[in-house]
Image (cartoon, rainbow, N blue to C red):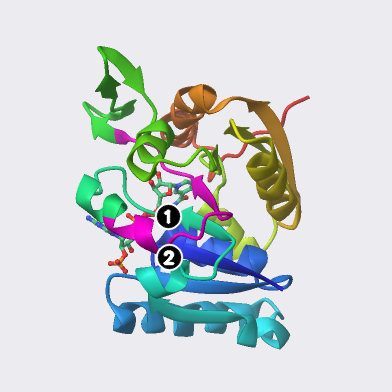
Amino acid sequence: VARIALVGGTGGLGKALCLAWCKDNQVVIGSRRLEKAQETLNAVKQRMRELGLSDYSSNISASTNSEAIKNSSLIVLTLPHDVDEKFILELAPYIQPGSVVVSPVSPFTLQGGSFQSIFRFKGGLPISFAEWVRDLLGTERVVSTLQTFPASRFYREGTINCDIPVAGDDHDAVHTTMEYLSQISGVRPIYVGPLSVSLQLELMTPLLLNVERFSRIRSPAIKLV
Ligand SMILES: NC(=O)c1ccc[n+]([C@@H]2O[C@H](COP(=O)([O-])OP(=O)(O)OC[C@H]3O[C@@H](n4cnc5c(N)ncnc54)[C@H](OP(=O)(O)O)[C@@H]3O)[C@@H](O)[C@H]2O)c1
Protein backbone atom coordinates (compact mmCIF):
# COMPACT_ATOMS: atom_id res chain seq x y z
CA VAL A 1 0.00 0.00 0.00
CA ALA A 2 1.38 3.41 -0.98
CA ARG A 3 1.93 6.14 1.57
CA ILE A 4 0.82 9.68 0.75
CA ALA A 5 1.88 12.70 2.84
CA LEU A 6 -0.28 15.81 2.90
CA VAL A 7 2.00 18.66 4.05
CA GLY A 8 -0.30 21.22 5.67
CA GLY A 9 -3.04 18.62 5.31
CA THR A 10 -5.23 20.34 7.91
CA GLY A 11 -6.83 22.73 5.38
CA GLY A 12 -9.69 22.26 2.93
CA LEU A 13 -7.66 20.58 0.20
CA GLY A 14 -5.90 18.20 2.60
CA LYS A 15 -9.19 17.03 4.09
CA ALA A 16 -10.70 16.41 0.65
CA LEU A 17 -7.62 14.46 -0.49
CA CYS A 18 -7.88 12.22 2.58
CA LEU A 19 -11.34 11.19 1.43
CA ALA A 20 -10.13 10.89 -2.15
CA TRP A 21 -7.27 8.49 -1.43
CA CYS A 22 -8.19 6.64 1.78
CA LYS A 23 -9.57 3.55 0.01
CA ASP A 24 -6.38 2.61 -1.80
CA ASN A 25 -3.55 4.15 0.25
CA GLN A 26 -2.17 5.10 3.64
CA VAL A 27 -2.77 8.86 3.88
CA VAL A 28 -0.91 10.94 6.48
CA ILE A 29 -2.25 14.37 7.49
CA GLY A 30 0.80 16.54 8.22
CA SER A 31 0.83 19.73 10.25
CA ARG A 32 3.25 22.07 11.99
CA ARG A 33 1.41 20.99 15.17
CA LEU A 34 0.62 17.36 15.91
CA GLU A 35 -2.52 18.25 17.92
CA LYS A 36 -3.95 20.13 14.94
CA ALA A 37 -3.29 17.14 12.67
CA GLN A 38 -5.09 14.91 15.19
CA GLU A 39 -8.10 17.25 15.34
CA THR A 40 -8.29 17.21 11.54
CA LEU A 41 -7.97 13.41 11.57
CA ASN A 42 -11.01 13.19 13.86
CA ALA A 43 -13.01 15.54 11.65
CA VAL A 44 -12.15 13.57 8.50
CA LYS A 45 -13.02 10.26 10.18
CA GLN A 46 -16.42 11.70 11.08
CA ARG A 47 -16.97 12.73 7.43
CA MET A 48 -15.85 9.25 6.31
CA ARG A 49 -18.51 7.70 8.55
CA GLU A 50 -21.15 9.98 7.00
CA LEU A 51 -20.05 8.95 3.50
CA GLY A 52 -19.98 5.22 4.35
CA LEU A 53 -16.18 5.02 4.22
CA SER A 54 -15.54 4.01 7.84
CA ASP A 55 -14.01 0.69 6.75
CA TYR A 56 -11.01 2.70 5.58
CA SER A 57 -10.54 4.93 8.63
CA SER A 58 -7.46 2.97 9.75
CA ASN A 59 -5.81 4.06 6.47
CA ILE A 60 -5.55 7.69 7.57
CA SER A 61 -3.30 9.06 10.30
CA ALA A 62 -1.93 12.30 11.73
CA SER A 63 1.63 13.49 12.28
CA THR A 64 4.01 16.41 11.99
CA ASN A 65 4.92 17.44 8.43
CA SER A 66 8.44 15.98 8.60
CA GLU A 67 7.21 12.63 9.97
CA ALA A 68 4.52 12.52 7.28
CA ILE A 69 7.08 12.96 4.51
CA LYS A 70 9.44 10.22 5.67
CA ASN A 71 8.66 6.96 3.81
CA SER A 72 5.96 8.58 1.66
CA SER A 73 6.16 8.01 -2.08
CA LEU A 74 3.80 10.91 -2.87
CA ILE A 75 4.16 14.24 -1.05
CA VAL A 76 1.43 16.80 -1.70
CA LEU A 77 2.16 20.38 -0.64
CA THR A 78 -1.33 21.47 0.43
CA LEU A 79 0.05 24.82 1.58
CA PRO A 80 -0.76 28.52 1.15
CA HIS A 81 1.16 30.28 -1.65
CA ASP A 82 2.92 32.67 0.75
CA VAL A 83 4.70 29.89 2.67
CA ASP A 84 8.32 30.79 3.57
CA GLU A 85 11.27 29.64 1.52
CA LYS A 86 12.77 28.38 4.80
CA PHE A 87 9.75 26.12 5.42
CA ILE A 88 10.17 24.42 2.01
CA LEU A 89 13.96 24.08 2.44
CA GLU A 90 13.47 22.40 5.84
CA LEU A 91 11.30 19.69 4.25
CA ALA A 92 14.09 18.67 1.84
CA PRO A 93 16.12 16.36 4.13
CA TYR A 94 13.04 14.21 4.83
CA ILE A 95 12.12 13.61 1.17
CA GLN A 96 13.26 10.19 -0.16
CA PRO A 97 15.11 10.34 -3.52
CA GLY A 98 12.40 8.45 -5.46
CA SER A 99 9.44 10.36 -4.02
CA VAL A 100 7.20 12.60 -6.08
CA VAL A 101 6.41 16.12 -4.87
CA VAL A 102 3.03 17.47 -6.01
CA SER A 103 2.24 21.19 -6.05
CA PRO A 104 -1.49 22.07 -6.08
CA VAL A 105 -0.74 25.67 -5.07
CA SER A 106 -2.03 28.78 -6.85
CA PRO A 107 -0.84 32.23 -5.83
CA PHE A 108 -3.80 34.64 -5.95
CA THR A 109 -5.56 37.31 -3.93
CA LEU A 110 -8.92 39.05 -3.77
CA GLN A 111 -8.34 42.55 -5.11
CA GLY A 112 -10.92 45.19 -5.96
CA GLY A 113 -13.74 42.65 -5.85
CA SER A 114 -12.22 39.96 -8.11
CA PHE A 115 -9.62 37.20 -7.71
CA GLN A 116 -6.25 38.10 -9.25
CA SER A 117 -3.06 36.05 -9.71
CA ILE A 118 0.11 36.94 -7.85
CA PHE A 119 3.46 36.38 -9.58
CA ARG A 120 6.96 35.37 -8.50
CA PHE A 121 9.80 36.38 -10.82
CA LYS A 122 13.03 34.70 -11.88
CA GLY A 123 15.40 36.51 -14.23
CA GLY A 124 12.69 39.10 -14.88
CA LEU A 125 10.10 36.52 -16.00
CA PRO A 126 7.16 35.17 -13.99
CA ILE A 127 7.62 31.61 -12.68
CA SER A 128 5.08 29.28 -11.19
CA PHE A 129 4.93 28.19 -7.56
CA ALA A 130 5.74 24.64 -8.70
CA GLU A 131 8.95 25.77 -10.46
CA TRP A 132 9.91 27.80 -7.40
CA VAL A 133 9.52 24.64 -5.28
CA ARG A 134 11.53 22.59 -7.79
CA ASP A 135 14.38 25.12 -7.62
CA LEU A 136 14.34 25.13 -3.79
CA LEU A 137 14.18 21.34 -3.42
CA GLY A 138 16.57 20.65 -6.30
CA THR A 139 14.47 17.78 -7.69
CA GLU A 140 12.96 17.28 -11.14
CA ARG A 141 10.30 15.03 -9.60
CA VAL A 142 7.93 17.94 -8.96
CA VAL A 143 4.49 17.63 -10.58
CA SER A 144 1.95 20.45 -10.81
CA THR A 145 -1.73 19.50 -10.59
CA LEU A 146 -5.01 19.75 -8.61
CA GLN A 147 -5.29 23.55 -8.90
CA THR A 148 -8.76 23.05 -10.40
CA PHE A 149 -9.91 20.34 -7.96
CA PRO A 150 -13.06 21.62 -6.20
CA ALA A 151 -12.06 20.47 -2.72
CA SER A 152 -15.05 21.71 -0.74
CA ARG A 153 -17.46 20.08 -3.18
CA PHE A 154 -15.56 16.79 -3.07
CA TYR A 155 -15.63 16.91 0.73
CA ARG A 156 -19.41 17.37 0.62
CA GLU A 157 -20.21 14.82 -2.06
CA GLY A 158 -17.32 12.32 -2.03
CA THR A 159 -17.13 12.34 -5.84
CA ILE A 160 -16.68 14.85 -8.66
CA ASN A 161 -16.96 14.37 -12.41
CA CYS A 162 -14.12 16.55 -13.74
CA ASP A 163 -10.81 16.71 -15.59
CA ILE A 164 -7.61 17.61 -13.75
CA PRO A 165 -4.67 18.95 -15.82
CA VAL A 166 -1.19 17.69 -14.90
CA ALA A 167 2.17 19.29 -15.78
CA GLY A 168 5.69 18.00 -15.08
CA ASP A 169 9.10 17.28 -16.56
CA ASP A 170 9.89 13.83 -15.14
CA HIS A 171 8.03 11.15 -17.11
CA ASP A 172 7.95 8.65 -14.26
CA ALA A 173 6.83 11.24 -11.67
CA VAL A 174 4.03 12.41 -13.98
CA HIS A 175 2.92 8.82 -14.65
CA THR A 176 2.87 8.01 -10.92
CA THR A 177 0.88 11.17 -10.11
CA MET A 178 -1.66 10.42 -12.84
CA GLU A 179 -2.20 6.95 -11.40
CA TYR A 180 -3.00 8.43 -8.01
CA LEU A 181 -5.33 11.02 -9.58
CA SER A 182 -7.16 8.25 -11.44
CA GLN A 183 -8.06 6.73 -8.06
CA ILE A 184 -10.10 9.82 -7.15
CA SER A 185 -13.80 9.13 -7.75
CA GLY A 186 -14.90 10.84 -10.99
CA VAL A 187 -11.53 12.40 -11.84
CA ARG A 188 -9.82 12.10 -15.24
CA PRO A 189 -6.20 13.36 -15.21
CA ILE A 190 -5.04 15.08 -18.42
CA TYR A 191 -1.32 15.59 -19.17
CA VAL A 192 -0.75 19.14 -20.45
CA GLY A 193 3.05 19.37 -20.79
CA PRO A 194 6.27 20.30 -18.95
CA LEU A 195 6.49 22.00 -15.57
CA SER A 196 6.82 25.38 -17.30
CA VAL A 197 3.10 25.03 -18.15
CA SER A 198 2.35 25.15 -14.41
CA LEU A 199 2.01 28.93 -14.55
CA GLN A 200 -1.01 28.44 -16.82
CA LEU A 201 -2.51 25.90 -14.40
CA GLU A 202 -1.97 28.21 -11.45
CA LEU A 203 -3.92 30.95 -13.26
CA MET A 204 -6.95 28.67 -13.42
CA THR A 205 -7.78 28.74 -9.70
CA PRO A 206 -8.56 32.48 -9.52
CA LEU A 207 -10.43 32.06 -12.82
CA LEU A 208 -12.69 29.38 -11.31
CA LEU A 209 -13.20 31.48 -8.18
CA ASN A 210 -14.27 34.39 -10.42
CA VAL A 211 -16.70 32.04 -12.19
CA GLU A 212 -18.20 31.22 -8.80
CA ARG A 213 -18.29 34.86 -7.73
CA PHE A 214 -19.69 36.43 -10.88
CA SER A 215 -21.79 33.63 -12.40
CA ARG A 216 -22.87 31.92 -9.18
CA ILE A 217 -21.81 28.43 -10.23
CA ARG A 218 -21.04 26.78 -6.89
CA SER A 219 -17.63 25.05 -6.62
CA PRO A 220 -17.07 24.98 -10.40
CA ALA A 221 -14.81 22.35 -11.96
CA ILE A 222 -13.59 21.86 -15.54
CA LYS A 223 -14.38 19.21 -18.15
CA LEU A 224 -12.54 19.17 -21.50
CA VAL A 225 -14.73 18.21 -24.45
N1 LIG B 1 -9.20 24.51 -0.99
C1 LIG B 1 -9.38 24.24 -2.29
O1 LIG B 1 -10.50 24.11 -2.79
C2 LIG B 1 -8.19 24.07 -3.20
C3 LIG B 1 -8.36 23.41 -4.41
C4 LIG B 1 -7.26 23.26 -5.25
C5 LIG B 1 -6.03 23.79 -4.87
N2 LIG B 1 -5.90 24.45 -3.70
C6 LIG B 1 -4.58 24.98 -3.31
O2 LIG B 1 -4.08 24.13 -2.32
C7 LIG B 1 -3.38 24.87 -1.33
C8 LIG B 1 -3.95 24.50 0.00
O3 LIG B 1 -5.31 24.93 0.07
P1 LIG B 1 -6.10 24.96 1.47
O4 LIG B 1 -7.38 25.64 1.22
O5 LIG B 1 -6.11 23.60 2.06
O6 LIG B 1 -5.10 25.93 2.30
P2 LIG B 1 -5.11 26.49 3.77
O7 LIG B 1 -6.25 25.92 4.51
O8 LIG B 1 -5.00 27.97 3.70
O9 LIG B 1 -3.72 25.96 4.34
C9 LIG B 1 -3.43 24.61 4.51
C10 LIG B 1 -2.52 24.40 5.72
O10 LIG B 1 -1.22 24.98 5.50
C11 LIG B 1 -0.60 25.18 6.77
N3 LIG B 1 0.04 26.50 6.80
C12 LIG B 1 -0.58 27.72 6.84
N4 LIG B 1 0.34 28.71 6.84
C13 LIG B 1 1.56 28.11 6.80
C14 LIG B 1 2.89 28.60 6.79
N5 LIG B 1 3.16 29.92 6.80
N6 LIG B 1 3.90 27.70 6.76
C15 LIG B 1 3.63 26.36 6.74
N7 LIG B 1 2.39 25.84 6.76
C16 LIG B 1 1.37 26.70 6.77
C17 LIG B 1 -1.70 25.09 7.81
O11 LIG B 1 -1.54 23.86 8.48
P3 LIG B 1 -0.96 23.74 9.98
O12 LIG B 1 -1.35 24.98 10.71
O13 LIG B 1 -1.71 22.53 10.46
O14 LIG B 1 0.49 23.51 9.85
C18 LIG B 1 -2.98 25.07 6.99
O15 LIG B 1 -4.03 24.34 7.59
C19 LIG B 1 -3.55 26.35 -1.69
O16 LIG B 1 -2.35 26.83 -2.23
C20 LIG B 1 -4.65 26.38 -2.70
O17 LIG B 1 -4.45 27.37 -3.71
C21 LIG B 1 -6.94 24.57 -2.84
Q: Nearer the viewer, residue 123 or 130?
A: 123
Local SS, label 1: loop
Position of the C terminus, as image quadrant, is top right
Residue, disc 2:
9
Residue positioned 57% across, 72% down in the render: 27
Q: Give, as a three-letter code, the residue at label 1.
A: Thr
**Mark 2 crowd level (few <14, some 14–19, many ≥20, 10 Å Cα):** many
* Residue 121: image location, x then y, percent: 26, 21
* Residue 37: image location, x then y, percent: 38, 77
Does the numbered disc 1 mark a residue whose Cβ is under 8 Å from ligand 1?
yes
Q: Nearer the viewer, residue 34 or 114?
A: 34
Does the numbered disc 2 mark a residue whose Cβ is under 8 Å from ligand 1?
yes
Check residue 78 in the rendering and tell me which mark sits there, or answer none: 1
Residue range highlighted in magenta: 90-108
CA distance separating discs 1 and 2? 6 Å
The answer to whether one can see residue 84 in this image is no
